[in-house]
Amino acid sequence: MAALLLALLAACGSGASDRTDQGGARQATRRRAGDQKGKGKKAKAKADTVPAATAVVTLRLAEPLATLERSAAAVSAVAPDVVYTINDSGHDADLFAFDTTGAHRGRWTIRGARNRDWEALAVGVCGERGAARAASCVYVGDVGDNERQRTALEIYRIAEPLGRAGGTRGALQSTVLSVRFSDRAHNVEAMYVAADGAIILITKVSGHLVGVDDERPRLYRIPASAWTDGTSATAGTSAIAALVDSLPEFPGGGRKRMVTDAARSADGRFLAVRTYTWVATFPLDSASGLPRRGVAPALCALDALAERQGEGVGFLGGSGGRVVLTSEGGEEPLRLATCPVPMR
């Protein structure tokens, strides 16, 4: 009888313990949910306080229909009022130039190139040493890969066009570099050239592939030495884009985080990274050429511009925050705007 009584008491104690554990688990779950909700509210509050672009100037293009899908922008290093742009996939392998009045300044066919998915454009030094380091080149990135299935991407490099008279039309010789990532395929729409001639690719975060860890944009580096002798590359020359970092955290989600272009300021101090609706400007580390850690970017909201599908950004002048913005759409204009730069 005593043994039976002890057994009943033990069972009751066990049930109470189970109920206590279950209640504690439920409370912990509620706390975690509350924490997540609180974080979400804080992130939304930060997003709501992002200042809008200022001093906006809208420039109608003299020949807008030639560039139906302006997927990227880059400001010339030798003519600071000239903006290069390209069309997205399915168009001719052409490089276009407009100035900051909207006037047409040139169109050149890039020999030996194919426009599979042109998404990125940059201007920078042509190599890692000597005359190549002093010269200026245009880099065209055939780096789009929405489904992340391409085994290799291509980057074309062209000496900056010298003829800038209105209506210039011609052909440019290019060199090409075949690029593979050090880990797996990525979709890229942004790149810039560091001071040492290295190319930095920034992945586009879309999150539409199930099972892919795509939370933050990643930075991949291609050394300037990949162009063989520092001045050229031939068909068949290949390089590995090595993972070097991820883009420092900034608030917002969805289209606010989908990186569509990037531009390094002429003095090398800042990097402007644009998404569909924001520009985030990061201070650059002079040694690595990468965004500095521990310094929050300055944010700029572009919603009021009502772009059809804003994708391109270029730095105008030095690092005062004046940028040029391009959007896909035949009748879309160039837009000039001022965005804040971070405190260093």
Image (cartoon, helix red, strand yellow):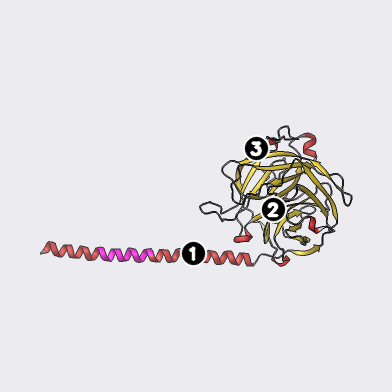
Q: Is label 2 in a helix, a strand or a loop?
A: strand
Residue under pointer 3? 239
Real-space Cα separation, disc 3 to disc 1, in angstroms: 45 Å
Residue under pointer 1? 35
Residue nearest the observer in this picture, 218 or 69: 69
Q: Does residue 79 appear left or right of residue 150 in this picture? A: right
Looking at marks 3 and 2 on the same chain, the residue that comes earlier in the sequence is marked by 3
Real-space Cα separation, disc 3 to disc 2, in angstroms: 22 Å
Residue located at (80% from left, 35% from top): 131
Looking at marks 2 and 1 on the same chain, the residue that comes earlier in the sequence is marked by 1
Q: Which mark is residue 261?
A: 2
234 relative to 264, above or below = above
Q: Is label 1 in a helix, a strand or a loop?
A: helix
Identify the magenta region.
14-25
338 relative to 155, above or below = below
**CB under 8 Å between callouts 3 and 1?**
no
Check residue 23 for magenta coloring: yes
Looking at marks 3 and 1 on the same chain, the residue that comes earlier in the sequence is marked by 1
